Image (cartoon, helix red, strand yellow):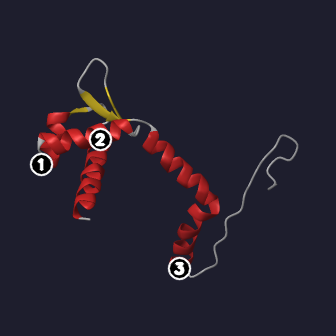
Amino acid sequence: MRVVKGAVDRSLQVIELFAREARGIGMSNVGAERELENGPTHRVLALLCEQGWAEQGKDTSQYRLTLELSELGQRYLRGLGLPGLAQPILDAVAAQCRERVHSVRHCRNSTDKGRAA
């Protein structure tokens, strides 16, 4: 099980590095930043590319994240919905103020100026 944890840990470290280096980063720089040898670095990058999480530039040796991670985050947030996202914040505000806090959807349309829908 140690090998799996190591591979997952290295992959997440590389993803975090890509998040800082949005324009791309070369394999040797990935290895140097994460203190990895060429073999493990190449395996992580190859796996991330194979799975669609990263891509290598056509005219360069630079690697970068694809939008897959962003899409995953968006799917997660859609699954939570607004109440799931807002409730922890509302709970914190209520605790700090020692008052009840509610969220209300407020919509305006052209026939009903200023009133909540």
The residue at the point 59 percent across, 64 percent down is: 84
Q: Earlier in the sequence, mark 2 or mark 3?
A: 2
How far is the residue under mark 2 from the one under mark 3? 38 Å
- The furthest residue to the bottom: 98
The residue at the point 67 percent across, 65 percent down is: 103
Q: Which mark is residue 18?
A: 2
Quadrant location, the N terminus: bottom left
Residue position for label 1? 35
Q: Examine the rendered structure and indicate whether residue 3 appears above or below residue 19.
A: below
Q: Examine the rendered structure and indicate whether residue 108 appears above or below residue 96.
A: above
How far is the residue under mark 3 from the one under mark 1? 44 Å
* Label 1 element class: loop
The three-letter code of the residue at mark 1 reads Glu
* Label 3 element class: helix
The three-letter code of the residue at mark 2 reads Phe
Labels 2, 3: front one: 2
Can you give x and y, in whole percent of width and height, for residue 63 in the image?
Answer: 28, 32
Q: Nearer the viewer, residue 114 or 86?
A: 86
Labels 2, 1: front one: 1
Q: Earlier in the sequence, mark 2 or mark 1?
A: 2
Residue 24 is left or right of residue 91, and the answer is left
The residue at the point 56 percent across, 82 percent down is: 98
Q: Nearer the viewer, residue 38 or 67?
A: 38
Q: Are marks 3 and 1 in contact (CB under 8 Å)?
A: no
* Label 2 element class: helix
The residue at the point 50 percent across, 43 percent down is: 71
Q: Examine the rendered structure and indicate whether residue 115 appears above or below residue 30.
A: below
Residue position for label 3? 95
How far is the residue under mark 2 from the one under mark 1? 15 Å
Labels 3, 1: front one: 1
